Amino acid sequence: MMKYSPVCNWIDGRPVPFDGQHLDVISPVGGSTLSRVPLSTPAVLDSAVSAAHRVFPEWSARTIKERSQVFYAYRALLAEHEAELTELIHQENGKTADEAKAEVAKAIEVTEFACSLPQLVAGEVLEVSPGVECHVRHFPLGVVASVTPFNFPCMVPHWTIPISLCLGNCLILKPSEKVPLTAQRTAQLLHQAGLPQGAMSVVNGDRRVVEAICDHADIAAVSFVGSTAAARQVYVRAAAALKRVLALGGAKNHLVVLPDADVSSTAANVVASVTGCAGQRCMAAASLVAVGDVEPVIQRVCEEARRVAPGKSLGAVISREAKERIERSISEAEAAGAKVLVDGRGATVRGCENGFYVGPTVLDGVRPEMRIAQEEIFGPVLAILRVRDVEEALAIENASLYGNAAAVYTQNGEAAQRFVQDASAGMIGVNVGVPVPREPFGFGGWNHSRFGVGDITGKSSIAFWTQSKKVTTRWT
Ligand code: NAD
């Protein structure tokens, strides 16, 4: 018996059951089957795109102030349904209830940013010669798409939903097939908030739907968030079909600890960064780069990590395959010469014996050429690399393929400034291990953590989801 009824696609303002192939939705918390999700065909996508095109003239003709009213109502519904959304996120993703609740708060924050869009897009106008005026107007692109990953079932879809819609576009959402329940509820709540039928559809499925989105002649833009390998494929394929694309990829974030760092706050902050969301976030600490003698910090990191309890303060990882892959990476690093200071392999949680848990893990003596130092592990695993000075630390950080986040721990302002200047990442923390910018500062990395221009939220999202007209006027 499944806890939730089968997920439907949400098309043209109503749930549409799918009579083709489905995939089970498994809860990482206890390994039970929660529901099943359609593996939709391109024909389902076609029906969603047609519905979006039908409503686009009416939705885009409304003023942005009118459209924003839908998001004021939606924001209230998100707050009203916070507990229900928190439970759905916890069940389908496996993160703790507190982490799930924080996601809903972030979705509310981006919705509030969308509510402020009328103030932000208000015009630019200049008299360019006597009696001649230029002004700029922003227009939506048309029907656009957003493809999202499993690790934030609520927050990441909200990076695009309220902003793209409020700017007058119609949206096709393709959530991760691992976490379709929160997305389904989101569509229902948007409908309840007054979004017109067809303005947002949810088409469930796997990479085949994403490929159909990339190739679809009637979709103008694609936003993607997921692993670097998939982001790269989507970027290339959608751009080849002449779409506007922003594709955010994976990460390998370096936290550089200098000898003058405050011991207890640094250790607590590093451990929170590694273990939060079970390490399954693109902003999680992956490598601690220890500059000189920072032994007291490392010792305290180990003590704090041992206190983090799977099933209580540490959520599950997404699947059995993920658990096995993470544990294999730890064993491989050990075989390559790393010393396991804290070992999270084989973790189990009483009452949730079939859940997918990996305990906090700290590996010392990791060298830059090891796989664990280079590849995204996406679990609660910290690799410690020892270096002599800041130059060596920066060289390691700069050599990473990725560039989402980087952080430095120090009490020296000059050293911090230098790190901010020279680290090769889009989001930098100074004594902050998860430097997620709050709105209106947009979210986005560098290097292979992002293909395309601009950030996914914040002011640059306005440029992504709109095209401008420059109007020159003279009345005689
Ligand atoms: P994923 O790449 O496996 O899947 C993401 C989405 O793309 C899903 O909807 C999936 O169905 C689809 N997909 C999978 N493979 C595809 C392919 N080859 N072509 C087209 N579509 C494909 O990612 P995931 O495992 O769901 O999420 C974890 C990854 O997402 C991690 O690498 C993490 O760092 C990254 N992530 C990045 C950010 C960021 O802002 N940079 C934010 C969250 C997650």
Image (cartoon, helix red, strand yellow):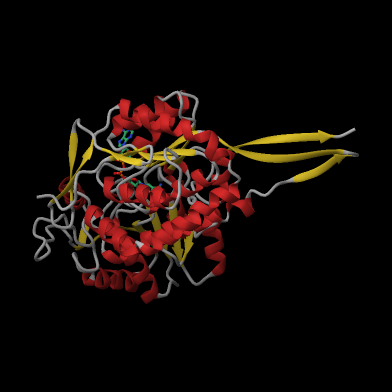
On the rendered image, what quadrant is the C terminus found in? top right
Q: Is residue 100 above or below residue 295?
A: above
Q: Nearer the viewer, residue 356 or 325?
A: 356
In-image side of 438 versus 212 (left or right): right
364 is higher (above) or lower (below) than 2: below
Q: How many marks?
A: 0
State which quadrant residue 24 falls in.
top left
Residue 112 seen:
yes
Residue beneath the point at 26% across and 63% down = 96
In x, y percent, where is residue 437? 49, 58
Nearest the eye: 8 or 90? 8
Residue at 31 percent of width and 47 percent of height: 184
307 or 454, which is in the foreground? Answer: 454
- Name the spot of residue 234 as percent of width and height, x first: 39, 32
**Residue 107 percent location from the top left of the image:** 42, 56
Q: On the picture, is 162 further left or further right than 270?
A: right
| Above/below status of 33 relative to 306 | above
Q: Residue at x 73, y 46 (%)?
A: 124
Query: Which residue appears at 39% of the width and 34% of the height?
Result: 232
142 left or right of 156 in image: right
Q: Quadrant of ligand 1?
A: top left
> In the rendered view, does 458 fall on the left or right side of 219?
right
Q: In the rendering, at what x and y percent does residue 23 appear?
A: 18, 38
- For the question of whether residue 388 can be seen, the reply is no
Asked whether 154 or 306 is in front, the reply is: 154
